[in-house]
Amino acid sequence: MKSMPRNLSIIISLLFILLLFHYPANAQIYFTKNGYAEFSSQSTLEDFTGKSEYLTGKINLKDSTVDFYIDLSTLNTGIKLRDEHMYEDYLEVDKYPFASLYGKLTGITDSSGSDTQKVAVKGNFKVHGISHKIQINGNLLKENDRLIVKASWPLQLQDYKIDIPRFLFLRVNRTIHISIQAELKVQPD
Amino acid sequence: MKLYQYMVRVFVFLYIIFGCLGLAMGQMKRERVKANIPVKAIFKAPNILLTNSVKNPYNNTLYMSIYHTFGPINSGVKEFFGLDVSANIRLGLDYGVKDRFSVGIGRTSYNKSIDGRVKYTLLYQRQNNNVPIHLSMAGDISINTRPHAYQEPYTFSDKLGYMFMIMTARKFSDNLSLQISPVYAHFNKVFEGEKNDTYGLIMAGRFKLTDHMAFAMEYIPQINKAKGNYNMFTVGVNIETGSHVFQLFISNTEYYNPQDILRYTRGNFWVGDIHFGFNVSRVFTFGAEGLHY
């Protein structure tokens, strides 16, 4: 067998090096496992709020991807019986355990340590097994080693085929307001 | 094709594949929070059909219940399959003093008995399986207030009956929960042929058919049955609608308190000595934000 020409060996080595360094440097990735999320329902008879401190989120500034999800069984409305009905009957948590948002971040400027910026996320929001394209507007504060994000948006229960509770125990508005707040730390290498 | 050309192609191919994977891997793996928190909704109500479930009413939650069982179905069309016969009715209230502790009172029309009961939850099954089962204990004391309950002379204590049970249950999946409960019952005075002390093992379970409906059954093999008694067997459905729980069933007993079930189950399920029954429970919650109903 003829030995390989030198320049081709170099090309192959370069390709190999490229392969290893393909992934973006970690300094651009921010992550949290304990962001805060809540939903609230206002109706003439009863207002209530469900809260969780288990919002997981990752923001990659290199490719502008935003990836958030939450285990819905961590939502707590303050009344255990109501939680039980919510998990079992309406959100069907065992079948559809997560709500998630995956999309692209727009509107961010690169300046670090500046004021809060208005940003938007365009992507898919998925809950109860149904996914819809949405745009969410929010605020982002970028500091050296962390991002602080805040956003809120309305959700129509029927868009996600979540039964509007017909029974007295859960008096829920068709429109639920969701808000999230999270502090994402830069991921250590 | 020369070997090195081939190798270049392989690397280009790998580069493209890994490049694409890199993009696809942008989405994190979704993981459930497996916290050390109690598994919820193991059963829908503090009772499965006729007997106690391991579940306690939550703190400040009141279950108001009305239980009925009718006459034997094999009494035929003459008695309209038991519906003409006056039903045994138990009216009950069970209140969650704490999440783990509840008290209840009830009145049963047969024997005009009044009973008080308590239930305490020792262990909750945990999501992360640190504790694999629910474990509760329940006790009940009943007083037969029927005049001339026994032939004179008899004392007040002769009218008392007791029950103690230990309930263990596990929610195996979203749909399936099973429970086993050893039960002991004692009556201070019984008629000839009956037994003062009886022991049984309640085997019960539910299987969810839809979000709001579950199939349920209960079977009590009795260890030292009195002559003429049968093992209690009940099958039915639980229907839950937010603040109500409806339970429809057929059973070979007409009684509700476990001590009465162990003493008075005299129908042979398999030859049709069965009764139709239904229970309705209404749930009220007295939260910090007021009454929820």
Image (cartoon, rainbow, N blue to C red):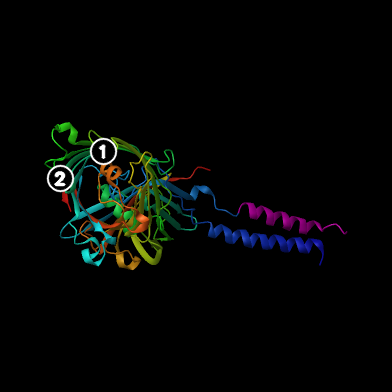
Q: Which residue is mark 1?
A: B192
Asked whether B227 or B28 is in front, the reply is: B227
Q: Which residue is mark 2?
A: B112
Label 1 resides on the chain identified as B
Horizontal arrangement in the rendering, residue B17 relative to residue A96 (left or right): right
Magenta-colored stretch includes residue A15: yes
Horizontal arrangement in the rendering, residue B59 relative to residue B166 (left or right): left
* Distance between mark 1 and mark 2 Cα atoms: 21 Å
Residue at the extreme left? B147
Give percent across and percent down for residue B69: 23, 55
- Secondary structure mainly formed by the magenta segment: helix
Tell me which amino acid carries mark 2.
Lys
Q: Secondary structure at mark 1?
A: loop
Q: Are marks 1 and 2 in contact (CB under 8 Å)?
A: no
Magenta segment boundaries in residue numbering: A1-21
Residue at the extreme right? A1
Magenta-colored stretch includes residue A109: no
Give percent across and percent down for residue B20: 58, 61
Residue A92 visible somewhere in the drawing:
no
Label 2 resides on the chain identified as B
Asked whether B38 or B210 is in front, the reply is: B210
Q: Is residue A66 above or below residue B122?
A: below
